[in-house]
Image (cartoon, grey):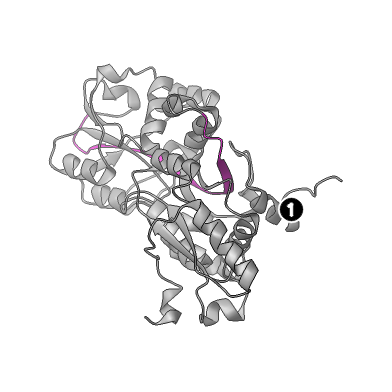
Amino acid sequence: MNMRRFAGMAFAALAVPVLGVVFALDLVAANAVPQRISFQILTGSTGGTYFPVGQLIAGLVSHPPGVDRCESSDVCGPSGLIASARTSEGAVANVLAVNAGTAESGLAQGDVVAQAVAGSGVFRKAGGQNNLRVMAALFPEQIHLLVARNSKIASVSDLRGMRVSLGAESSGTAVAVSEILKAYRLPVWRMKTSRNPTDVDAQLLRQGKIDAFFFAGGTPIALVDDLVSRGIARIVPIDGAGRDRLIKAVPEFSASQIPRGIYRGVGPVDTVSVRALWVVNARVPDTLVYGIMKALFSSGNRAALRQGHAAAAAIRLQSAVLDLPAPLHPGAARFYRDVGVLKPRRN
């Protein structure tokens, strides 16, 4: 394989537990010879935001041997690092895998991470996820409520009696929807509900088999654009008193707006957003996390993030550590202190 192309790919590496990363780094220290360091980024479905952004980040931080981009400037992660973006069942599944150490890292919504750390909500049975650490807050995810274009649904409250998909079981969307429905005082039993992956929901809406579905993701989302531009769906606002109650009850949510023109022919739509976080297992070595953060926020990668995906363009050093629902990984914290985003430790 041409190694110059290798660095820009989304690497499809086999699953490697966290202990494998530790062992690889020990070999590097002992032999001073760069070893392959596999590092997974669990994402979501290919139709969402997590997967393309995860691919982009994996390509930027990977550092295989013989790649001029990595050798000539400080834009790649530690030598030998091969990061891979992997599809998954969603944010809840990602958090459980990262906490268990069956994957090194993953993307998840802030509200999902908050529940995981507290052992509440969907994590009540599993308990607190104590091995979860944050590398960075990345970008906002807007909650989309898509409804059949010819339906009379104009608000969340109008979903009563409708056929509504609440998101796949292990998805961050499902967690967000549960919180939204509580805030709007709409019991699940008042709807005809299903729980499907987003690509399935889109197909069911096209076929007239459901009336509405929710989806959380950083705009723009290609699947959403296709549905609204072809006259199949509308985006319904999430606003009013229900939104106010949601933001008060769940601090990880904030008022947001999908701007005019993000989707073809669609004006501004009020909604709520929650931040996408990059989480990592606590046992991943500090030096590895530090090097990955240094590469992600390198000025030499700024243009690639901006041009690679609209959601990735929102990744900013200044907002990476604001109001996090879980502890920072020590390696990430050291990086943020070194660049002045966090205050130095007191002796």
Rate crowding at label 1 as few (under 14), some (14 to 19) or many (20 or more) other CA atoms within 10 Å.
few
Q: Residue at 53% across / 58% down in the picture?
A: 21
Of residues 336 and 125, the one nearer the viewer is 125
Locate residue 304 relative to residue 162 in the image: left or right. Answer: right
Q: Residue at 19% across / 40% down in the picture?
A: 205
Quadrant placement of the N terminus: bottom left
> Which percent across, then down, holds residue 113?
51, 37
Of residues 272 and 331, the one nearer the viewer is 331
- Going by the numbered disc 1, the residue's amino acid type is Arg
Classified by dominant secondary structure, the portion drawn in magenta counts as strand
Outermost right residue: 347
> Which percent across, then down, holds residue 239?
43, 29
- Determine if residue 310 is in view: no
Determine which quarter of the picture holds residue 92: top left
Residue under label 1, please give it: 337
Outermost front residue: 30
> Which percent across, then down, holds residue 174?
36, 33
> Which percent across, then down, holds residue 329?
63, 47
Which region of the structure is painted magenta? 128-152
- Determine if residue 174 is in view: yes
Q: Is residue 97 magenta?
A: no
